[in-house]
Image: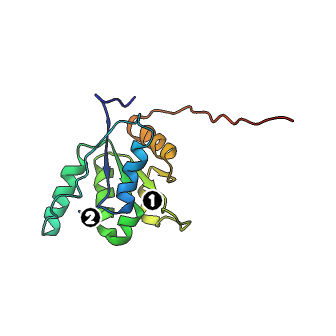
């Protein structure tokens, strides 16, 4: 189980700049207040100038993670860079959780679906459960309780 001493290390796809979906991921992860993670992605750092330096920087960020979260919004901006991040994650034997398109019913690009181990809806419970399953192989056995009145 993730704990403050043993958080899930995750990498969120980026192109050296944060966007709404990037920030939203962390809002969802922090909402319950009981999910512990460490973010290995560093979009705030200066973007390396040449392509190989960019790839090396991304490899360095992805290497320590346990799971990669793919944002379709970043893929739309720089598909080649996101595909590189996904390919490196696969070569490093890191599972991939792809997020659905936020606020849209558009299907995910085939390239993302083909490499993703799991696709998550945009809600904190689905996302956290997917990360636990993929990073730590922890099955969550949550039950919803529904209250209703009989008249």
- Number of numbered labels in the structure image: 2
- Neighbor class of circle 2 (other Cα within 10 Å; few <14, some 14-19, many 20+) is some
Q: Residue at x 47, y 59 (%)?
A: 113
In the image, is residue 65 above or below residue 51? above
Residue 25 x/y as whole percent: 39, 52
Quadrant position of the N terminus in the picture: top left
- Neighbor class of circle 1 (other Cα within 10 Å; few <14, some 14-19, many 20+) is few
Q: How is the image coloured?
A: rainbow
Q: Is residue 85 left or right of residue 31?
A: left
Task: Tell me which numbered mark, 2 or 1, is placed earlier along the sequence.
Answer: 2
Residue 36 x/y as whole percent: 35, 36
Q: Is residue 138 left or right of residue 37?
A: right
Quadrant position of the C terminus in the picture: top right
Q: Residue at x 34, y 69 (%)?
A: 79
Residue, disc 1: 114
Residue 111 x/y as whole percent: 42, 64
Residue, disc 2: 15
Residue found farthest to the front = 151
Q: Is disc 1 placed on a helix, strand or loop?
A: helix
Residue found farthest to the bottom = 77
User: How far apart, in angstroms, are the residues tagged by discs 2 and 1?
Assistant: 21 Å
Residue 80 x/y as whole percent: 30, 69
Q: Is residue 137 left or right of residue 87?
A: right
Q: Is disc 2 placed on a helix, strand or loop?
A: loop
In the image, is residue 6 above or below residue 60? above
């Amino acid at each position: 189980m993730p704990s403050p001493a043993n958080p899930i290390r995750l990498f969120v796809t980026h192109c050296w700049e944060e966007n709404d979906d990037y920030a939203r991921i962390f809002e969802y992860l922090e909402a319950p207040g009981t999910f512990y993670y460490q973010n290995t992605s560093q979009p705030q750092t200066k973007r390396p100038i040449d392509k190989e330096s960019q790839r090396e920087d991304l490899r360095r960020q992805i290497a320590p993670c346990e799971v990669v979260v793919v944002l379709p919004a970043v893929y739309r901006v720089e598909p080649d860079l996101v595909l590189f991040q996904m390919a490196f994650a696969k070569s490093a034997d890191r599972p991939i959780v792809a997020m659905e398109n936020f606020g849209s019913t558009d299907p995910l690009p085939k390239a993302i679906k083909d490499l993703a181990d799991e696709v998550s809806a945009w809600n904190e419970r689905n996302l956290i459960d997917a990360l636990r399953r993929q990073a730590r192989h922890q099955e969550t056995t949550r039950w919803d309780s529904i209250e209703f009145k009989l008249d």
